[in-house]
Amino acid sequence: MSSEACQTLREIESGRLEISDFAPPDVFSPGLFNQYPLTVADLRWHLTECDECDSSMAVARDQVKAFDSDRTAAISAALDSVEEALRCRIAWLRQESQSMAEDIAAEFGPEYEEPTVRADLVEDWSRNILLENLDR
């Protein structure tokens, strides 16, 4: 693999290829290599193991750093959107559990009409409904 990795890094250094060409979606689909039998990880590892490549491949190293920065930013953005989606889902679940608890209290009739008793029951039932569904 080292001669293939060395040759690939030379092509990256000359500008014919880019490190992003070796990212997983571009390199392979499940079990099959589409274009190259190397990945970014292979090239990154090779840069640390091959003294010749390590000393002469500044462009490739810079591309690896830029690639890592871009992927880190994309992962961070994805995690932020997941966090926001979870926050919205929990807020919706709280509203739904409150509404369901109020419907349950309305069905029980006049013995639960006293405001403090009813409010306590609604709060308790709402919390129970929320906890039962939160893990979903």
Image (spheres, rainbow, N blue to C red):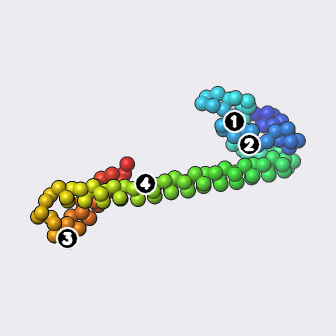
State the image coordinates of residue 133 (x, y, percent, origin top left). Answer: 33, 51
Q: Residue at x 74, y 52 (%)?
A: 65
Task: State the CA–CA distance, disc 3 to disc 2.
Answer: 64 Å
Task: Return the x and y of residue 25 as percentages of the image width and height.
Answer: 66, 37
Query: What amino acid type is highlighted by mark number 1?
Result: Asp
Amino acid type of the residue that numbered disc 2 sits on in the rendered structure: Ser
| 99 relative to 25, above or below | below
Q: Is residue 69 left or right of residue 132?
A: right
Task: Looking at the image, tell me whether mark 4 or mark 3 is earlier in sequence order.
Answer: 4
Cα–Cα span, label 4 and label 3: 29 Å
Number of the label disc, if any, that sits on residue 26: 1
Q: Nearer the viewer, mark 1 or mark 3?
A: 3
Give how far apart the Cα atoms at labels 2 and 1 are.
8 Å
Measured Cα–Cα span from mark 4 to mark 1: 34 Å
* Lower position in the chain sequence, tag 4 or tag 1: 1
Tag 2 or tag 4, which sits nearer the N-term? 2
**Which residue has dot 4 on it?**
89
Residue projecting furthest to the left: 111
Q: Residues within 10 Å of mark 3 (few under 14, many from 20)?
A: few
Disc 3 vs disc 2: which is toward the camera?
Answer: 3
- Kindly identify which residue carries mark 2: 20
Q: Residue at (17%, 55%) from the top-left corner?
A: 107
Q: Amino acid at mark 3?
A: Pro
Q: Earlier in the sequence, mark 2 or mark 1?
A: 2
